[in-house]
Amino acid sequence: MTTKNVCACGSAPKLIFACSGAADVGAVADQAARKLTKDGAGKMFCLAGIGGRVSGIMETTKSAARILAIDGCPLNCVKNTLEQAGFKKFEHLQLADLGMEKGKTSPVPETIAKVTEAGASKLVC
Protein backbone atom coordinates (compact mmCIF):
# COMPACT_ATOMS: atom_id res chain seq x y z
CA MET A 1 0.00 0.00 0.00
CA THR A 2 1.30 3.44 -0.93
CA THR A 3 1.09 6.32 1.52
CA LYS A 4 0.73 9.79 0.09
CA ASN A 5 2.69 12.48 1.91
CA VAL A 6 0.50 15.30 3.12
CA CYS A 7 1.79 18.49 4.67
CA ALA A 8 0.74 21.95 5.67
CA CYS A 9 2.24 23.45 2.51
CA GLY A 10 -1.21 24.15 1.12
CA SER A 11 -1.89 23.52 -2.52
CA ALA A 12 1.54 24.59 -3.76
CA PRO A 13 3.28 21.72 -5.54
CA LYS A 14 6.38 19.87 -4.38
CA LEU A 15 8.51 19.59 -7.50
CA ILE A 16 11.20 17.04 -8.30
CA PHE A 17 13.89 17.71 -10.88
CA ALA A 18 16.13 14.77 -11.76
CA CYS A 19 19.18 13.98 -13.76
CA SER A 20 18.19 11.82 -16.69
CA GLY A 21 21.70 11.60 -18.10
CA ALA A 22 23.20 8.79 -20.13
CA ALA A 23 25.05 7.17 -17.22
CA ASP A 24 23.64 4.50 -14.94
CA VAL A 25 23.28 6.98 -12.07
CA GLY A 26 21.23 9.23 -14.37
CA ALA A 27 18.84 6.35 -14.93
CA VAL A 28 18.64 5.76 -11.17
CA ALA A 29 17.91 9.44 -10.47
CA ASP A 30 15.26 9.56 -13.20
CA GLN A 31 13.52 6.37 -12.07
CA ALA A 32 13.58 7.47 -8.42
CA ALA A 33 11.92 10.77 -9.38
CA ARG A 34 9.25 8.88 -11.31
CA LYS A 35 8.66 6.60 -8.31
CA LEU A 36 8.42 9.58 -5.94
CA THR A 37 5.78 11.02 -8.28
CA LYS A 38 3.89 7.74 -8.44
CA ASP A 39 4.02 7.48 -4.63
CA GLY A 40 2.57 10.99 -4.28
CA ALA A 41 5.61 12.53 -2.57
CA GLY A 42 5.88 15.24 -5.22
CA LYS A 43 5.66 15.83 -8.95
CA MET A 44 8.49 15.24 -11.38
CA PHE A 45 9.00 18.38 -13.42
CA CYS A 46 10.88 19.33 -16.57
CA LEU A 47 14.51 20.30 -16.01
CA ALA A 48 14.89 21.16 -19.71
CA GLY A 49 12.13 23.75 -19.24
CA ILE A 50 14.20 25.39 -16.51
CA GLY A 51 17.27 25.39 -18.73
CA GLY A 52 15.22 26.86 -21.58
CA ARG A 53 13.55 29.38 -19.24
CA VAL A 54 10.07 28.29 -20.38
CA SER A 55 7.78 30.84 -18.72
CA GLY A 56 5.09 28.45 -17.44
CA ILE A 57 7.63 26.03 -16.00
CA MET A 58 9.57 28.88 -14.39
CA GLU A 59 6.42 30.32 -12.79
CA THR A 60 5.23 26.96 -11.47
CA THR A 61 8.66 26.33 -10.01
CA LYS A 62 8.70 29.75 -8.34
CA SER A 63 5.41 28.88 -6.63
CA ALA A 64 6.53 25.44 -5.42
CA ALA A 65 6.21 24.58 -1.74
CA ARG A 66 9.40 22.52 -1.97
CA ILE A 67 11.88 21.65 -4.69
CA LEU A 68 14.05 18.55 -4.80
CA ALA A 69 17.04 18.28 -7.13
CA ILE A 70 18.32 14.73 -7.67
CA ASP A 71 21.77 14.57 -9.25
CA GLY A 72 23.19 11.31 -10.52
CA CYS A 73 26.86 12.26 -10.48
CA PRO A 74 29.10 14.92 -8.94
CA LEU A 75 28.78 17.17 -12.01
CA ASN A 76 25.55 18.34 -10.34
CA CYS A 77 23.77 19.33 -13.55
CA VAL A 78 20.37 19.58 -11.85
CA LYS A 79 21.67 21.76 -9.02
CA ASN A 80 23.60 23.98 -11.43
CA THR A 81 20.66 24.35 -13.81
CA LEU A 82 18.34 25.43 -10.99
CA GLU A 83 20.89 27.86 -9.57
CA GLN A 84 21.65 29.39 -12.98
CA ALA A 85 17.91 29.96 -13.42
CA GLY A 86 17.84 31.88 -10.13
CA PHE A 87 16.53 29.18 -7.78
CA LYS A 88 18.45 29.08 -4.54
CA LYS A 89 16.05 27.43 -2.10
CA PHE A 90 15.83 23.72 -2.82
CA GLU A 91 16.83 20.38 -1.38
CA HIS A 92 19.67 18.58 -3.11
CA LEU A 93 20.23 14.84 -3.28
CA GLN A 94 23.54 13.71 -4.75
CA LEU A 95 23.68 9.97 -5.43
CA ALA A 96 27.42 9.87 -4.65
CA ASP A 97 26.48 10.87 -1.08
CA LEU A 98 24.51 7.61 -0.94
CA GLY A 99 27.57 5.63 -2.03
CA MET A 100 26.50 5.37 -5.66
CA GLU A 101 29.22 5.69 -8.27
CA LYS A 102 28.91 6.52 -11.94
CA GLY A 103 29.54 3.43 -14.05
CA LYS A 104 29.06 1.09 -11.10
CA THR A 105 25.42 1.59 -10.04
CA SER A 106 22.76 -0.46 -11.76
CA PRO A 107 19.22 0.94 -11.93
CA VAL A 108 17.77 -2.04 -10.04
CA PRO A 109 14.76 -1.82 -7.70
CA GLU A 110 16.92 -1.84 -4.54
CA THR A 111 19.03 1.10 -5.73
CA ILE A 112 16.00 3.08 -6.87
CA ALA A 113 14.28 2.39 -3.52
CA LYS A 114 17.28 3.76 -1.61
CA VAL A 115 17.19 7.02 -3.60
CA THR A 116 13.40 7.22 -3.35
CA GLU A 117 13.55 6.91 0.43
CA ALA A 118 16.24 9.59 0.72
CA GLY A 119 14.32 11.88 -1.64
CA ALA A 120 11.00 11.44 0.17
CA SER A 121 12.59 12.54 3.44
CA LYS A 122 13.74 15.78 1.78
CA LEU A 123 10.24 16.59 0.52
CA VAL A 124 8.55 16.52 3.92
CA CYS A 125 7.45 19.97 5.07
Image (cartoon, helix red, strand yellow):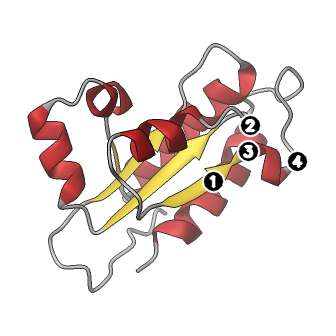
Dot 2 amino acid type: Pro
Task: Kindly identify the residue that appears in the image at 40 percent across and 40 percent down.
Answer: 84
Residue at label 1?
A: 93
Residue at label 3?
A: 95
**Residue 96: % across, % down:** 80, 44
Q: Quadrant of residue 4?
A: bottom left
- Identify the element where label 2 is drawn: loop
Residue at label 4?
A: 99
Is residue 32 left or right of 85 when viewed as pictured? right
Viewer-side residue, 52 vs 7: 52
Task: State the mark number for residue 74.
Answer: 2
- Identify the element where label 3 is drawn: helix
Upstream in sequence: badge 4 or badge 1:
1
Is residue 106 left or right of 31 when viewed as pictured? right
Are the residues flagged by discs 1 and 3 in contact, CB closer than 8 Å? yes
Dot 1 amino acid type: Leu
Task: Kindly identify the residue that appears in the image at 64 percent across and 61 percent down.
Answer: 117
Label 4: how many Cα within 10 Å (few below 14, some 14–19, many 20+): few
Mark 2 to mark 1 CA distance (whole Å): 11 Å
